[in-house]
């Protein structure tokens, strides 16, 4: 059995706890210790040099094993941030003269990397017009080496047909890279439908407590070997203490995701039926443009991010998001606590207002990143704030 073959082997909740974790061979400690050491004795024989920048510190390799099992991939790698992971992944595939086709809606940092930094290295990017696989084929040319998309996009929570895109790319010999941060390996395992490289911002659901910065990659042994080789020289390796926190967070990933997604669905349904709400966005809502795709490509839930547009002006909405008792005003997602932000003032601040409106992101849009509190308290909070109290 391949690690992570969930049809026959252990399920994600069991893998999250046990895969890659302790006991420590030296001491019998049940939990993998923090090996806070940059270097290790010269190995006897031909074993590889052990040095923490190389990603072979035991606290790091515990994360690699757990993550590979959860992603259902041959191998995995932890890095110092989500951006280190995505930059290392792209540069492990593309060089001068190569071309990338990317989804139109990506994380802001990824957009900056694609629009500002990669062109300086002679790597060109075209954005596919929409999620339709035919648009990706039209945007591709003979130099296209990589297709890049997010499993669930921000802030409209669009869900591309990953299996269809992966199959088309494979037929053309194009590598695929998916940022699956919003789904986590609990709700989507892109490696299981043939995606070559899967990236996560470990800062979000994997870590789960808003207390660390980390990123991860998963894929075939050969692709992860190449990414690791590049990490040796780019240097985006994860610190042992952050690796420990990441592994500790991942142990509860399955139970936390179940709660995040239960809250996501309950809050989305509440907002969709509220008279003071013009529009709610969540992949399981029947009026969501990708609800059918989501039902096919996401398993067991759609995560804790819900977006809505109240029937208010942008400045009235600013007052609204300040009235919550439990939901705190801060960027990011994936922690146990619920957070709220307005895309027009955070992730999409740099985009001209007109372009935002064209993209379906009005200035009064609110993004909720729901935590694991009780959904009835979150709903009470929203209900009260929408009533102006
Ligand atoms: C946060 C985030 C990133 C960047 O991750 P960092 O850990 O902050 O570097 C990339 N993609 C998505 C979808 C994110 O939410």
Image: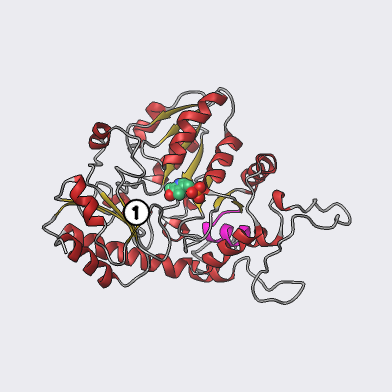
Q: Can residue 306 be seen in the rendering of this structure? A: yes
Bounds of the magenta span?
A: 63-74
Instruction: In the rendered view, tell whether residue 197 sits above or below residue 203.
Output: above
Q: Where does the image place residue 377, in percent across and percent down from the top left?
A: 27, 71
Crowding at label 1, few (<14), some or many (≥20) Cα neighbours within 10 Å? few
Answer with the quarter of the image where residue 69 lies: bottom right
Q: Which residue is mark 1?
A: 296
Locate the C terminus and report the quarter of the image it occupies: bottom left
The structure residue drawn at horizontal position 50% and vertical position 55%, both measured from the top left corner, is 203
Query: Does the magenta segment cover residue 73?
Result: yes
The structure residue drawn at horizontal position 37% and vertical position 32%, both measured from the top left corner, is 128
Question: In front here: 293 or 277?
Answer: 277
Q: Where does the image place residue 351, in percent across and percent down from the top left?
A: 32, 34
Question: In front here: 339 or 160?
Answer: 339
Q: Where does the image place residue 197, in percent across and percent down from the top left?
A: 54, 45
Q: Main secondary structure of the magenta part?
A: helix
Residue that extends furthest to the left in the rendered view of this protein? 275
């Amino acid at each position: 059995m391949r690690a992570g073959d969930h049809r026959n082997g252990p399920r994600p909740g069991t893998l999250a706890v046990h895969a890659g974790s302790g006991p420590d061979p030296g001491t019998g400690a049940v939990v993998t210790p923090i090996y806070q050491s940059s270097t290790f004795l010269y190995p006897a024989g031909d074993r590889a040099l052990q040095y923490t920048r190389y990603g072979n510190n035991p606290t790091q390799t515990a994360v690699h094993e757990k993550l590979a099992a959860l992603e259902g991939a041959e191998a995995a790698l932890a890095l110092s941030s989500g951006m280190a992971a995505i930059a290392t992944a792209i540069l492990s595939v593309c060089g001068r003269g190569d071309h990338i086709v990317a989804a139109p809606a990506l994380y802001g940092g990824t957009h900056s990397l694609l629009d500002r930094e990669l062109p300086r290295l002679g790597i060109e990017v075209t954005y596919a017009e929409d999620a339709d696989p035919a648009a990706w084929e039209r945007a591709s040319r003979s130099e296209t080496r990589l297709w890049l998309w997010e499993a669930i996009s921000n802030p409209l929570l669009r869900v591309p047909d990953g299996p269809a895109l992966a199959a088309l790319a494979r037929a053309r010999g194009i590598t695929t890279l998916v940022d699956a941060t919003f789904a986590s390996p609990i709700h989507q395992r892109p490696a299981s439908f043939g995606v070559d490289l899967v990236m996560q911002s470990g800062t979000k659901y994997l870590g789960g407590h808003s207390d660390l910065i980390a990123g991860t990659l998963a894929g075939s042994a050969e692709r992860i070997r190449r990414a690791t080789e590049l990490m040796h020289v780019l240097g985006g390796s994860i610190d042992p203490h952050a690796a420990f926190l990441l592994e500790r967070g991942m142990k509860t990933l399955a139970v936390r995701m179940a709660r995040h997604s239960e809250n996501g669905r309950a809050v989305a349904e509440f907002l969709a039926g509220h008279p003071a709400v013009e529009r709610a966005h969540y992949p399981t809502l029947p009026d969501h443009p990708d609800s059918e795709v989501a039902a096919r490509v996401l398993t067991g839930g759609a995560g804790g991010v819900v977006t809505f547009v109240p029937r208010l002006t942008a400045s009235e909405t600013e007052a609204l998001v300040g009235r919550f008792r439990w939901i705190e005003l801060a960027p990011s997602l994936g922690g146990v606590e619920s957070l709220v932000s307005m895309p027009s003032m955070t992730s999409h601040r740099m985009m001209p207002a007109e372009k935002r409106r064209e993209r379906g992101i009005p200035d009064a849009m609110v993004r909720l990143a729901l935590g694991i509190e009780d959904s009835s308290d979150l709903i009470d909070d929203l209900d009260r704030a929408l009533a102006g109290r």
